[in-house]
Image (tube, rainbow, N blue to C red):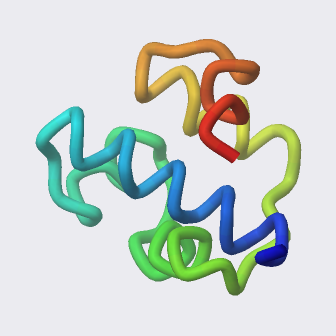
Amino acid sequence: MEDIRVRFGKALRQRRNKLGVSQEAFADMCHLDRTYVGGIERGERNVALVNIEKLAKTLRISISELFGGV
């Protein structure tokens, strides 16, 4: 089974693409650095809870919905 960070990153990328925004635009919307968001999507980052909340709010979904794809 893939690492949770990789699965979370894939779920995040899928949701971001569904929203139709670039990684850079999404990072700006979340008030996060683009390289940080890229690291999350590649499964390289262990994301803090406060940032998970920012990501979910920007996607306009609940945290549980975001983890539903994991």
* Rendered position, 70 above or below 19: below
Q: Position of residue 66 (x, y in %)?
A: 62, 31
Q: Nearer the viewer, residue 54 or 42?
A: 42
Residue 51 falls left or right of residue 59: right
Residue placed most toward the observer, 60 or 33: 60
Residue 3 image position (x, y, % from top left): 83, 76
Query: From the viewer's perspective, is residue 8 above or below residue 31?
Result: below
Name above or below for residue 1 compared with residue 9: below
Question: Which residue is nearer to you in this view: 8 or 27?
Answer: 8
The spot of residue 19 in percent (x, y) is 22, 33
Residue occupying image coordinates x 54% and y 21% = 57
Q: Is residue 33 left or right of residue 66?
A: left
Q: Is residue 6 above or below residue 53?
A: below
Which residue in the rendered view is the most extreme toward the front?
1
The residue shown at (63%, 20%) is: 65
Q: Residue at x 46, y 77 (%)?
A: 38
Q: Position of residue 1 (x, y in %)?
A: 83, 74
Residue at position x 40%, y 57% in the image: 13
